């Protein structure tokens, strides 16, 4: 795979994708004797050999704890861990590597902000604003913060087309300390205008906290261009391993925050009665971190950059266009979410009155992996008035013929349930 | 894990029939025991109302929405427990419920298949207090 040829094209050619697929050994699996058609990357992406190999190499050749040992392989491990941080920082346009805190996942990053920034800065009478389209991970931490501080929790509504209704935004932001919102809806695929929302938050005197989980894997992201204050995302959705994620925050905010978790690795001087804390980012990385996973995430960033985020985004949109057009021709299929121009590669649907779990089970029998359920988004599902939807999501290793397999599976389900 | 290779085996005609035409559907006025619960994984929801005469289940009704497996399983369960003693139902094992269901259920769908019995037992436990 040549980074240059790929980056030069607006998307990915069939040949590019064929070469990419070779890097993903899991795509050779045959569940129920059928080729694996993995359409659930929005939940967790598959891993290329380069990521698996980087972690394997660390465990085989230079595993040691970091920031402690004075011996050679500990230095190698420390350097690889910090190099991964620099790669991530460059990848998202951070001002410095110190702004990138390694956490377990996006959920932990959001909890870190709610705990360390929120408990120090939010008081009774303040407001916390979130949107109706948030994943539970960007809702529940703010519910808890509101309950503990006595702050009010307000919601930016979602309109019938699946877009944020911003008509009352300035009223909602009046008196707000925090505006937390997602860059991309994990349920509807809606792409929000992060720069605009962050600017409105700033104008109202609130910090902006972005759930970047679905954005960082699938589109070019520059946190400084976004102009937000915090952004959190998971490694496992962007070709990296589970157990590693990133909280990015503006350095002056991170610098002023107390620790989230305490213990080894995050201290400066420890006395029996009290301690002083290390500088950012170490202050927020108590205990031995996920070293192999951070190195794996660094390899994932390398892979994504070699293919090119512009190309990945363009290709994913091309697949989404094909899927929306094909699904529109299938009777009884109802698609949720906004028009194509506001979307990325996440499609939520229902098929007649077939429950999402029944549809997913039948698709699974054809080797097709989709998400079924409420997508950790129960309030939005209640608003849409559906018990659950089936979600297909695309990534750089998916192909147009796989969409045909999806549609054949939907037709099979309609046959079983007697739907015309 | 159970490899239920053919979905035709899972979605047999009698399962789809119970799903489309649930037996003992609805609610009871002034039930002796009632409970409602959901399966947070998929949002399946089932309510069970029970009328008890002496020590026996005199009548049972269920209401809910969800997948074919959860709704058909609850429908079959209501047929199976009517006329049984409360003690018999309380001692009903998950295995017995699955056997009565008559299809092989994969591990991820077990919660769907067992939601009905879970709700029914909760209703009876609540009455016992």
Image (cartoon, rainbow, N blue to C red):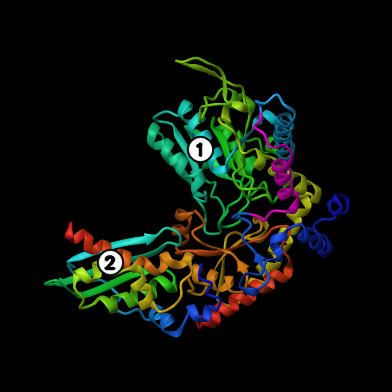
- Which image quarter: residue A412? bottom right
Q: Is residue A248 above or below residue A254?
A: below
Q: Position of residue A113 (x, y in %)?
A: 53, 34
The residue positioned 78% from the left and 58% from the top of the image is A20
Q: CA distance from mark 1 to mark 2?
A: 37 Å
Q: Chain of mark 2?
A: B
From this viewpoint, is residue A178 visible? no
Q: Magenta residues? A: A45-66
Residue A375 is covered by the magenta coloring: no
Q: Which residue is mark 2?
A: B120
Residue A127 marker: none
Q: Which residue is mark 1?
A: A111
Q: In the rendered image of this protein, does residue A412 appear above or below residue A122?
A: below
Q: Nearer the viewer, residue A316 or B127?
A: B127
How crowded pointer 2 is (Cα within 10 Å; few <14, some 14-19, many 20+) is rated as: many
Q: Position of residue B116 (x, y in %)?
A: 33, 68
């Amino acid at each position: 795979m040549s980074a240059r040829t790929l980056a030069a094209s607006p998307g990915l050619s069939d040949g590019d994708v064929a070469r990419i697929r070779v890097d993903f050994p899991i795509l050779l699996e045959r569940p129920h004797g059928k080729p694996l058609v993995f359409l659930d990357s929005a939940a967790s992406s598959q891993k290329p050999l380069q990521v698996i190999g980087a972690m394997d190499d660390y465990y085989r050749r230079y595993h040691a704890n970091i920031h402690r040992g004075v011996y050679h392989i500990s230095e190698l491990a420390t350097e690889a861990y910090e190099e991964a941080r620099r790669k991530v920082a460059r990848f998202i346009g951070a001002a410095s590597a110190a702004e990138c805190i390694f956490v377990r996942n996006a959920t932990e990053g959001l909890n870190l902000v709610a705990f360390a920034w929120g408990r120090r800065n939010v008081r009774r009478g303040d407001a916390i604003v979130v949107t109706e389209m948030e994943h539970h991970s960007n809702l529940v931490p703010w519910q808890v913060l509101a309950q503990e501080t006595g702050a009010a929790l307000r919601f930016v509504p979602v309109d019938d087309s699946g877009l944020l209704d911003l008509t009352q935004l300035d009223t909602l932001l009046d008196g707000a300390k925090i505006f937390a919102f997602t860059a991309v809806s994990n349920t509807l695929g809606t792409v929000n205008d992060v720069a605009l929302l962050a600017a409105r938050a700033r104008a109202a005197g609130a910090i902006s906290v972005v759930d970047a989980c679905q954005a960082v894997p699938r589109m070019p992201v520059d946190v400084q261009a976004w102009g937000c204050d915090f952004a959190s995302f998971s490694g496992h959705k962007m070709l990296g391993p589970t157990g590693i994620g990133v909280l990015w925050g503006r350095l002056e905010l991170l610098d002023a925050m107390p620790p989230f978790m305490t213990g080894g690795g995050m201290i400066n001087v420890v006395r029996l009665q009290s301690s002083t804390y290390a500088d950012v980012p170490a202050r927020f990385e108590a205990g031995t971190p996920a070293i192999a996973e951070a190195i794996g995430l660094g390899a994932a960033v390398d892979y994504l950059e070699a293919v090119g985020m512009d190309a990945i985004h363009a290709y994913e949109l091309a697949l989404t266009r094909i899927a929306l057009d094909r699904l529109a021709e299938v009777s009884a299929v109802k698609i949720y979410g906004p028009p194509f121009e506001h979307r990325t590669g996440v499609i939520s649907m229902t098929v007649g009155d077939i429950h999402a779990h029944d549809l997913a089970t039948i698709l699974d029998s054809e080797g097709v992996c989709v998400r079924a359920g409420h997508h950790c988004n129960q309030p939005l599902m209640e608003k849409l008035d559906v018990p659950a939807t089936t979600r297909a999501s695309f990534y750089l290793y998916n192909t147009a013929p796989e969409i045909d397999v999806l549609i054949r599976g939907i037709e099979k389900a309609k046959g079983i349930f007697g739907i015309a | 894990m159970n490899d239920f290779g053919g979905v035709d085996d899972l979605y047999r005609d009698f399962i789809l029939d119970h799903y489309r035409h649930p037996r003992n559907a609805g609610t009871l006025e002034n039930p002796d025991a009632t409970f409602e619960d959901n399966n947070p994984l998929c949002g399946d929801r089932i309510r069970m109302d029970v009328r008890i005469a002496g020590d026996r289940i005199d009548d049972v009704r269920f209401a809910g929405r969800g997948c074919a497996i959860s709704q058909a399983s609850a429908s079959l369960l209501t047929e199976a427990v009517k006329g049984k003693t409360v003690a018999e139902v309380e001692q009903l094992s998950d295995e017995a419920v699955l056997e009565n269901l008559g299809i092989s259920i994969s591990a991820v769908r077990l919660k769907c298949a067992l939601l009905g019995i879970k709700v029914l037992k909760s209703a009876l436990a609540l009455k016992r207090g």
